[in-house]
């Protein structure tokens, strides 16, 4: 599947203006407690909340809130992070860029320095089935071999997996079958302050469920597909069932999972370069982004001289770091006529990470050329 072909296929969607897709935002006050923010999100069945402080747009999502400790008293300000914003004339391509980079499901829209709405990933997905996607198959876009947990897994363990791995879905097995899918939304509800009746009437208490097992917590409303099912049918099934995931199975054997993120990754930003290069989630807050991209494209062009690189794709995930810094996980897929290579690195300095990826790429592709040369020499002897 050519990334160039896919980019051209979705070009019309990516150029769509966000003004027609704006929905109501969940707004919070930075001074409120984590518990209050959780209640707002769960009552609205939302993933993201936003606010403005000191002319900066801030966001917190369900995954962030899972990291809260004393949620009844902890201030949500400690979990907020900066996020870029849109105006009504921006394109969906920029909205997708903000969503994929920040690991959110919506991007805020501003007017006169006020948040007037959000562009949700779900509403972007609604546009995808309006064009023919039968040639894009589930096995071309899914995340393979997802982490699976048992019903007897502790909720604390599931919570840790979600916060460290930065994803929101864990298929739960009972014996040899998947019984439900645990989402970050379900885990969040287990840490909400609850009420009980005491001698003096109703009093609030925080339920600590980390040492409880998953059991039947999760959703049994599971969308399933086979590897050769097309993207259009997958998206329609997810929207019809109002789920944020689809399990890909073959003969009752789990092959992978498709989430909003996997689908939006198809609509990545194409970089101007001699070799088709697509970058998903490049941060806007980095001052040297153009320099980093320019160095990496030059590395690709240099390696191209020793190996025929057809396409390259880069995925960047942002994690909370220390202070104002962020940590990044970066993975690169390099496609050649003979093999599909994947390299990854992490850290807080994107420039250094891309340098490391370039070195790994150069070593791996140079090694292949050397091995092919040795084989040729043997045949000549």
Image (cartoon, rainbow, N blue to C red):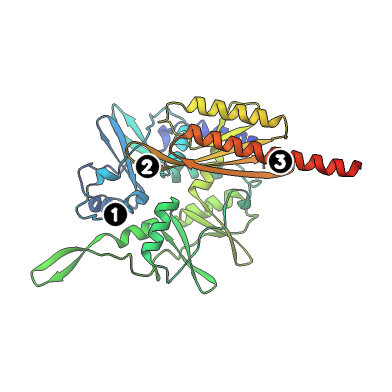
**Mark closest to the chain's N terminus, 1 or 3:** 1
Q: Secondary structure at mark 1?
A: helix
Is disc 3 placed on a helix, strand or loop?
helix
In terms of depth relative to the viewer, which is nearer, 249 or 191? Answer: 191
Q: Which residue is mark 3?
A: 367
| Residue identified by numbered label 1 | 43
Quadrant occupied by the C terminus: top right
Residue extending farthest bottom: 175
Which residue position holds label 2? 321
Q: Position of residue 326 (x, y in %)?
A: 39, 39
Question: Dot 3, how many residues are within 10 Å of its Cα: few (below 14), some (14-19), or many (20+)?
Answer: few
Q: Residue 168's x, y, as percent?
A: 43, 54
Q: Mark 1 against mark 3, which lies toward the viewer?
A: 3
Q: Residue furthest left?
A: 200
Picture residue at 75% right of the left edge, 38% below the top: 369
**Picture quadrant of residue 320:** top left
Counting residues from the N terminus, which is met first, the one under dot 2 or under dot 3? 2
């Amino acid at each position: 599947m050519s990334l160039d072909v896919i980019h051209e296929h979705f070009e019309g969607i990516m150029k769509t203006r966000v003004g027609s897709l704006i929905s109501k935002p969940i707004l919070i006050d930075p001074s409120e407690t984590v518990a209050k923010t959780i209640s707002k999100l769960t009552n609205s069945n939302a993933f993201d909340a936003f606010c403005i402080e000191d002319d900066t747009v801030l966001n917190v999502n369900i995954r962030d809130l899972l990291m809260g400790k004393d949620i009844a008293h902890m201030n949500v300000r400690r979990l907020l992070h900066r996020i870029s914003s849109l105006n009504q004339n921006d394109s969906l391509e920029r909205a997708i860029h903000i969503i994929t980079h920040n690991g959110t499901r919506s991007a805020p829209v501003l007017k006169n320095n006020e948040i007037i709405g959000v562009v949700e990933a779900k509403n972007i997905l609604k546009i995808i089935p309006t064009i023919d996607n039968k040639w894009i198959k589930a096995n071309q876009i899914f995340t393979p071999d997802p982490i699976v947990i048992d019903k007897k897994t502790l909720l604390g363990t599931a919570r840790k997996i979600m916060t460290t791995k930065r994803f929101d879905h864990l298929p739960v097995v009972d014996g040899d079958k998947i019984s439900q899918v645990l989402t970050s939304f379900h885990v969040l509800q287990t840490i909400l302050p609850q009420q009980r009746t005491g001698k003096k009437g109703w009093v609030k208490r925080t339920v600590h469920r980390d040492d409880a097992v998953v059991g039947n917590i999760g959703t049994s409303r599971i969308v399933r597909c086979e590897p050769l099912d097309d993207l259009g049918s997958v998206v329609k099934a997810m929207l019809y069932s109002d789920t944020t995931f689809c399990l890909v199975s073959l003969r009752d054997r789990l092959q992978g999972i498709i989430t909003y993120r996997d689908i939006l990754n198809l609509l990545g930003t194409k970089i101007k370069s001699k070799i088709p290069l697509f970058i998903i989630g490049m941060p806007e807050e980095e001052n040297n982004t153009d320099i980093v991209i320019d160095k990496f494209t030059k590395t690709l062009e240099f390696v191209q001289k020793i190996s025929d690189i057809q396409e390259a794709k880069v995925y960047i995930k942002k994690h909370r770091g220390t202070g104002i810094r962020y940590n990044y996980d970066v993975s690169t897929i390099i496609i050649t006529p003979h093999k599909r290579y994947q390299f990854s690195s992490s850290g807080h300095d994107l420039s250094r990470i891309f340098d490391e990826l370039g070195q790994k790429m150069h070593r791996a592709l140079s090694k292949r050329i050397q091995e092919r040369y040795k084989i040729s020499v043997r045949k000549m002897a």
